[in-house]
Amino acid sequence: MGGANQTPCNRGYFFFRPLRRERFERLRARKFPDRKSFTMNDTATLPPPLASNAENGAEIREGETAATRTPTNRDAAAVTQPGPVTPAASQKNSAVKPKPVPHDAPERVTQAGAIRIENEETLRAVPIYYEARGQWYCGDGHGRFAKITDAQSKSFLAEYGFNKNAKDGQGNTPAERASLWLTQNHRVDFAGALAGYTAGIHESGGIRFLVTESPSFIMPKPGKWDKIRLLIESLFFDADAPENEQRRQVDCFYILMSESYAAYYRRMVESETDKFRHCPALAIFGPRLCRKSVLIELVMTPLFGGKKADPMNFLRDGKFNKDLFGASLLILDDKGASANLAERRQRGEGIKDLLWKEQQRMEGKGQDAVNLRPFWRMIIAGNDDHAGLQICPALSPSLEDKILILRAQQAEGLPQTHEERDAWADEIRAEISAFAAFLLSYRPPENVKLDPRTRVPIFQHPKIVAALRELQPEMRLLELIDTLGLIDTDSPLWEGRATEFEQAMKQKDSEGLLTRVLTGNSGTTGKMLTELHQLVPNRVNVTTRNGSSYYKIFRAT
């Protein structure tokens, strides 16, 4: 590259085409204001080249020293203008290093990985909690806790004085460090509504959890509850029973309600959440429109927090039961009840687990399971016909003390028109606090025998029990024994093994009735006879001989 009009300039060369003198002078004055004038063709007038001071990098003319040199405008321009720079040897690897942390500075993270923060006491009082699955919760100012995002949690922390913009030497803001501290110290294994607990932090069985809302609670207040009394006592008064037994169902209902409400009161008012109380399920069967559902909706549900849940799907499938943990009342009604004997037996085992296990495993979809201790009471309600009774689990001796079975009558004092019903319902609601006060002060009659574990009577209405047993194939088998005349007239009993029993019955069964009883049932003949031994031990007895079951069947008396 070259040309006739090229002119050397300073220590390097730059090339430009011939310019008019005026333009060249303007360019020269703008580029080199401290140089003497020179022309495009006059290279002799160029200033001498500048030397570099190796000590401080300043440019010095020939004949000058660093001490005598006068600074020029070009020195300042050399500092700010870009261009190739050769750093001095003393400036190599001169990256800015962080200042060493003083020996007395607080430790940011402990050896165990715990975050240290100066204003810990202030942060500990902040109502923000971190659930193990990655969700933040914050107090909403109304006694509840609501879900918030990660960004919202830092904004809340900023309101408590933790700046979310100024970063420290490690690149974290005070709000971010506070957030890290909260994930370690305000961490909970579960967050949500939990029956029988007030809103806030609780611990049980080594599990720390956040209850996000308190159930509604009606404070007991002495007063009149005449309409509730009439509803209950007319519903359960048994006019068909002997005179001394006519109020037995009424007493059973009051005792169960008194024990249940007292336990609920102690949880809500005295925070007695560490004590578990066994309580049987309450089963109510009666004619259609007898107003058993009114009792459940208007009286029982408000007394126990105002929430109820249906456990049928869980009892059937055995999984995903999180929706049950926010309600104190578990209600089973006769809608869609299955008549399948195996399912009814499974339902009975499930009811025992729900009511008699202190720790309950809560499992939701896509969530880790956790063991909690909810406050649960169960109500089973249905009509007293064949279809309605199917909701009740198959009776067995193991359920005798776990289900209190009452037979309902038509309630009295009920409204007739819609306007009357609304006013009547309002009066019922107004009496609930007085009814709650009655339950807290109630004492069972002295002549009522109580189960020592539940302090509730063991009672199952005989007419409902007889109707339920008619649904079980074992009872149909017993009826068939009497119909076919298995036991000879001159013998008090029949005895033998299950195979011998089946052969003897088939010899007398010309219409195939035995096959109909056995078909569709999961149990064999031996299992059905063993079940009869549990249901009616005065009719069927089972012993073991030479390693196999041996049965004795007695005549009906």
Image: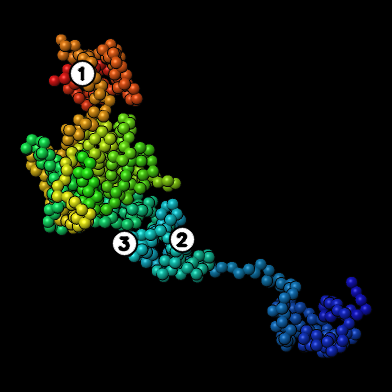
Disc 1 packing (10 Å; few <14; some 14–19; many ≥20): few
Question: In the rendered image of this protein, does residue 122 appear above or below residue 522?
Answer: below
Quadrant of the drawing holding the N terminus: bottom right
Q: Residue at x 19, y 23 (%)?
A: 537
- Residue that label 2 marks: 150
Please state the horizontal and vertical placement of residue 8, each as a whole percent of the image: 86, 79
Instruction: Give whichever of discs 1 and 2 has the lower sequence position.
Output: 2
Extreme residue in the left direction: 243
Q: Amino acid at mark 2?
A: Asp
Residue at mark 1 to residue at mark 2: CA–CA distance: 73 Å
Instruction: Give whichever of discs 2 and 3 has the lower sequence position.
Output: 3
Extreme residue in the top direction: 490
Number of numbered tags placed on the structure image: 3
Q: Secondary structure at mark 1?
A: helix
Residue at mark 3 to residue at mark 1: CA–CA distance: 65 Å
Q: Is 184 situated left or right of 479 in this image?
A: right
Q: Secondary structure at mark 3?
A: loop
Instruction: Give whichever of discs 3 and 1 has the lower sequence position.
Output: 3
Q: Nearer the viewer, mark 3 or mark 1?
A: 1
- Residue that label 1 marks: 482
Question: In the rendered image of this protein, does residue 397 appear above or below residue 155?
Answer: above
Please state the horizontal and vertical placement of residue 293, each as a whole percent of the image: 23, 46
Q: Residue at x 28, y 44 (%)?
A: 331
